[in-house]
């Protein structure tokens, strides 16, 4: 069997319709893989100040040294310039993507240029083909695109199929890329970058092996990691109810954003909780490749085509984030209504958090009279009263149906700048906010994180620690900075963050040894800091200024479980973050 080399980077040019492979040992030896290698490739390939929809904006996909070898090393990191924020675009997806890229023989793939007509890329080992996708372009649902590609492409059971929906085709700035139907490169608009290149899909499969230098030592460490994952709480935490189990605890503590964060408790939370969904709708749990946990929860919903006609059964993935953004944020308290909306958003290829937050803002703007029936094209959003209204709104956003929906497709900050209502337009750093109104650490984490995501530093869990015992702000910020560095290590390897408790640094060091990589916990954290700096430098280069970020009034008005937040306090914490992370020189000219 031919072995895959992690050092191989596949460069594809869609304009010239050519490709080449370069060995980039220099990058992988220094930055491991995943986020570390991707940010360096982004620095190399993305010209300063480039329009995110220019052919010169690269799409970078990177995996890591543990991919294909250890449990939960199942993620691929995508980097690009984000059309939503105008700076760093970073998004992670699982499914089969990571293992497929590695077994096809690559550590990273860089896609540049753009096609004049719709295409998809088919990669099978060293065969790379750019194929016509005219018949796939404009298909109503991303699910259907997957079904067609499964019929015509090789590699069943091993391949990954990444594709965009009509939102990506229409350059909705938070369009996602759907992976294996139920996983996504969700945030920051990778789907729109695909769309700008007329790239409908990528199919990747391979049959190569992954070399291990010390097989005996590898099997020993593998066994230890596998056991620690399957025999500890992490398995039950994510497998039984999945992240949907967060709904009721967050609601109970008053941290579940509801009706555009006018409230933090939702009186109908029980109806859309992980418990209710599991009891009434859950039909299956599936996993990314090489993951024994299986946190992907699939619900089944039987709906009539039309009154008096046959039924179809929809299979719909759910987890905490869409329950928050398409459920409580819109006041939707019916599980069936929520699932129907998730299914629509998935099919259109929209990021669930961004579109949910955008529609929550639109509902409030409509109720305050900032927009009227003219802008909404006759739709009357009213906090979950009629789910059909939100289904149709999502469709209109994905199609940029008029000026108003086109503004929403550019992000809630753009829409609010145009129609008013910035005080309740809930973004951090230009990205629509995730569902944790737990306290200052969460908001500071969203504001300072390179992706402006809850996944950057998990500030919400620091707030929850502060609820159990007092914590001063310096300590909160210190924990945000350290967690972000640690996560940069994991996302360079590329390990699913749900396994962060099992992949402590000492264990990571031992996992790397049989692969011929010698390092130490200290060196890994140093690398985490370097990656943090590289991401911040890219953001600063593209105009991001952490000192003047907009903080929506609504974040300050609605109390968290740790009390009301003050803008002054949040801005102090941002300064502390910059100092503690050693980023003062990166942002020196902006202060
Ligand atoms: S825990 Fe979930 S997201 Fe993470 S690798 Fe497993 S199935 Fe994928």
Image (tube, rainbow, N blue to C red):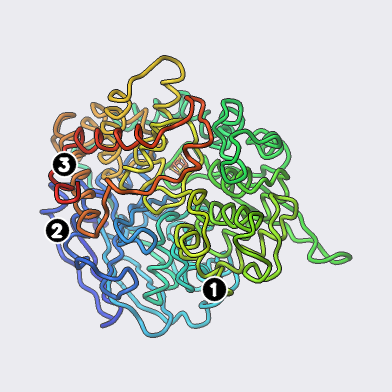
- Name the foreground residue: 396 vs 24: 396
Q: Is residue 559 left or right of residue 93?
A: right
The Cα atoms of the two marked residues, 2 and 1, are separated by 45 Å
Pointer 2 or 1: first along the chain? 2
Q: Specify the label residue 24 is tagged with.
A: 2
> What residue is pinned by disc 3?
584
Residue 548 percent location from the top left of the image:
30, 48
Q: Is residue 330 left or right of residue 218?
A: right
- Is disc 1 placed on a helix, strand or loop? helix
Disc 1 under 8 Å from ligand 1? The reply is no
Q: Residue at x 56, y 72 (%)?
A: 399
Pointer 1 or 3: first along the chain? 1
Q: Is residue 119 left or right of residue 575?
A: right
Q: Is residue 219 visible?
A: no
- Name the foreground residue: 249 vs 111: 249
Q: Residue at x 28, y 47 (%)?
A: 546
The Cα atoms of the two marked residues, 2 and 3, are separated by 31 Å
For the residue carrying disc 3, how many other residues have a C-alpha within 10 Å: few (<14), some (14-19), or many (20+)?
Answer: some
| Image label count | 3
- Is disc 2 placed on a helix, strand or loop? loop
Q: Residue at x 71, y 61 (%)?
A: 380
> What residue is pinned by disc 1?
403
């Amino acid at each position: 069997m031919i072995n895959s080399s992690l050092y191989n980077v596949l460069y594809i040019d869609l304009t010239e319709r050519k490709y080449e492979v370069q060995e980039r040992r220099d990058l992988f030896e220094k930055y491991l893989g995943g986020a570390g290698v991707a940010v360096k490739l982004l620095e190399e390939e993305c010209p300063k100040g480039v329009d995110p929809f220019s052919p010169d904006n690269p799409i970078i996909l990177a995996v890591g040294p543990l991919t294909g070898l250890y449990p939960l090393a199942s993620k691929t990191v995508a980097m690009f310039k984000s059309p939503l924020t105008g700076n760093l675009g970073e998004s992670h997806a699982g499914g089969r993507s990571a293992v497929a890229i590695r077994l096809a023989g690559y550590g990273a793939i860089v896609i540049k240029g753009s096609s004049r007509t719709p295409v998809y890329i088919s990669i099978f080992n060293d065969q790379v083909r750019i194929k016509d996708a005219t018949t796939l372009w404009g298909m109503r649902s991303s699910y259907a695109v997957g079904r067609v590609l499964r019929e015509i492409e090789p590699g069943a059971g091993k391949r990954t199929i990444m594709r965009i929906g009509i939102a990506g085709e229409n350059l909705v700035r938070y369009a996602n890329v759907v992976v294996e139907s139920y996983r996504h490169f969700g945030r920051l608009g990778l789907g729109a970058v695909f769309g700008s290149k007329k790239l409908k899909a990528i199919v990747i499969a391979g049959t190569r092996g992954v070399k291990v230098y010390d097989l005996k030592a590898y099997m020993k460490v593998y066994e230890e990691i596998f056991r620690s994952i399957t025999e500890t709480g992490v398995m039950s935490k994510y497998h039984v109810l999945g992240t949907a189990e967060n709904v009721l605890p967050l609601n109970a503590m008053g941290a579940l954003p509801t009706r555009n964060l006018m409230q933090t408790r939702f009186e109908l939370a029980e109806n859309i909780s992980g418990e209710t969904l599991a009891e009434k709708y859950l039909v299956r749990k599936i996993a990314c490749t090489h993951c024994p946990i299986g946190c992907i929860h699939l619900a089944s919903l039987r709906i009539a085509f039309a009154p008096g006609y046959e039924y179809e059964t929809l299979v719909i993935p759910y987890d905490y984030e869409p329950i928050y953004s398409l459920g409580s944020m819109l006041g939707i308290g019916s599980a069936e209504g929520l699932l129907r909306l998730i299914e629509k958003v998935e099919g259109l290829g929209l990021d669930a958090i961004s579109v949910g937050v955008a529609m929550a803002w639109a509902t409030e703007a409509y109720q305050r009279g900032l927009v009227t029936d003219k802008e909404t094209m006759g739709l009357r959003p009213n906090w979950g009263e009629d789910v059909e209204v939100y289904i149709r709104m999502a469709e209109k956003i994905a199609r940029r149906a008029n000026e108003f929906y086109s503004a929403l497709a550019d992000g809630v900050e753009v829409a609010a700048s145009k129609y008013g209502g910035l005080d309740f337009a809930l973004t951090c750093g230009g990205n629509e906010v995730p569902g944790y109104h737990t306290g200052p650490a969460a908001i500071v984490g969203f504001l300072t994180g390179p992706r402006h995501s809850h996944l950057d530093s998990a500030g919400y869990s620091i707030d929850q620690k502060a609820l159990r015992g007092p914590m001063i702000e310096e300590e909160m910020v210190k924990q945000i900075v350290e967690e972000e560095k640690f996560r940069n290590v994991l996302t360079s390897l590329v390990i699913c963050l749900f396994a962060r408790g099992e992949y402590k640094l000492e264990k990571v060091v031992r996992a790397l040894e049989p692969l011929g990589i010698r390092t130490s916990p200290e060196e890994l954290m140093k690398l985490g800091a370097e990656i943090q700096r590289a991401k911040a430098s890219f953001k600063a280069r593209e105009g991001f200024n952490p000192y003047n970020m907009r903080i929506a009034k609504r974040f300050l008005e609605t109390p968290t479980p740790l009390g009301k937040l003050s803008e002054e306090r949040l801005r102090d914490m941002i300064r502390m973050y910059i100092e503690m992370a050693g980023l003062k020189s990166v942002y020196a000219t902006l202060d």
